[in-house]
Amino acid sequence: MFSKFLSHVKGLPPRSTDWANRMGPVALMGYSGGIPQSANRLLQHFYACPRDSDIYAEMTFHKTAPIECPPETVFFMPVLECGNMLAEGEAGTPSKDDWYLASTQATTELTEKSYVPVSVGGNGPATLSMIEAYKNLFPTEDVVLLHFSAHPNLVQDDAPIRVLLEKNLLKGVVSVGNRCVTSMDRKIRKQHHMFYMDMHAIYSKGLFCIRDIRNDYPVFISIDASVMDPAFAPAVETPIPGGLSTRELLHIMNGIRGPKVIGVDIHGYNPALDIHRGDGIGLTQMALAKVLKESILKCYTISTQTEEEGMARVQMMQRQGTISENPYPDH
């Protein structure tokens, strides 16, 4: 089981030396543990949709490695297509443990070769296996988990975030967008000193309140589709009204700070529950493809600088003639 996928990942060469001191490239894999076909449907639309992002960066897709590092004067985001973990027609039904072991093994291989692993699909356990794989490789390196979800997901003993906290594998957790919080969730939050921005707090203080939080630790980004309002992402198991719009989520993601992204897990999408247009494309499918694209952009552009510091650096580079003063390069 998973033999075709894992043999492909093991056979990948390390990233080339011209990537030294640069972030990337990203390696994208489909994980459907817990929700069959979730990765297939999302990746199918992702690869078919436009490749440009919000800041004039464009993705390029590659089936083989090594990937040539793009010059600094052109902003391309190479994406290595690793495919779905469970190949079509592969015999057997994987258990939860099977998915965990395969995800851990794939993340270890990709991280050792200096790729940034990005997992799409499933119902959330990939966050656990990917962070554990990273910490096995770099036990002394601190990691901050940014978790976007309608639920804190802390009550169950085997909940990924709770397991990571109890194993002391995280420097900290920032939980964003919660709006369905139980008393047990609150108790565990307090016990582990979690930082959280529930929906009512975000709207009472404003979206800008979390834009420039200083962070000097590597970041893992975990996005549950339920963080979005059902008007934008209806295809989730437990939709909770009052969530973020697509643009609000992207705005918050744009403010994530840190020296690097060590991995991304986008999960919670159930294609059987989606609302489709006449051409068969689902609303949640479209929204999450955009979120995935901007998550990949964050893997290449994350910085410890605040927006104010970043703009000062851009202005300095404009004065030096390194980059154009025209913010609209096509005009």
Image (cartoon, grey):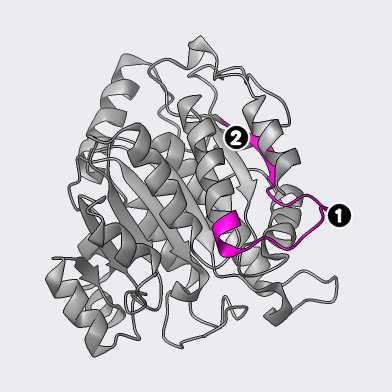
The residue located at (26%, 24%) in the rendering is 316
> Label 2 sits on what residue type?
Asp
Q: Which mark is residue 309?
A: none
Q: Which of the two marks, 1 or 2, is nearer to us in this view?
A: 1
Residue 123 in the magenta stretch? The answer is no
Q: Which mark is residue 89?
A: 1
For label 2, the crowd category at 10 Å Cα-Cα, with few meaning under 14, some 14 to 19 and many 20 or more, is few
Residue placed most toward the observer, 329 or 190: 190
The image position of residue 279, as x and y in percent, is 85, 70
Magenta stretch contains residue 81: yes
50 and 199: which is toward the camera? 199
* Residue 54 visible in this rendered orientation of the protein: no
Residue at x 78% of width, y 76% of height: 277
Where's the C terminus, which quadrant?
top right
Q: Nearer the viewer, residue 108 or 300?
A: 108
Left/right placement of residue 42 relative to residue 150 reads right
Could you tell me if the residues under marks 1 and 2 are in contact, i.e. CB atoms within 8 Å? Answer: no
Task: Identify which residue is drawn at 34% across, 23% down.
Answer: 318
User: Range of the magenta residues?
Assistant: 77-98
Indicate whether 315 appears above or below 130: above
Residue 240 position within the rendered picture, expressed as x and y whole percent measured from the top left: 46, 87
Badge 1 density bin: few <14, some 14–19, many ≥20, Cα 10 Å: few
Amino acid on which disc 1 is placed: Gly
- Residue where numbered disc 2 is placed: 330
The secondary structure type at the circle numbered 1 is: loop
Q: Horizontal and vertical percent for residue 235?
A: 62, 78
Q: Residue at x 69, y 53 (%)?
A: 46
Image location (x, y in percent) of residue 210: 23, 61
**Helix, strand or loop at mark 2:** loop
Say left or right for 68 vs 320.
Answer: right
Left or right: residue 118 compared with residue 7: left
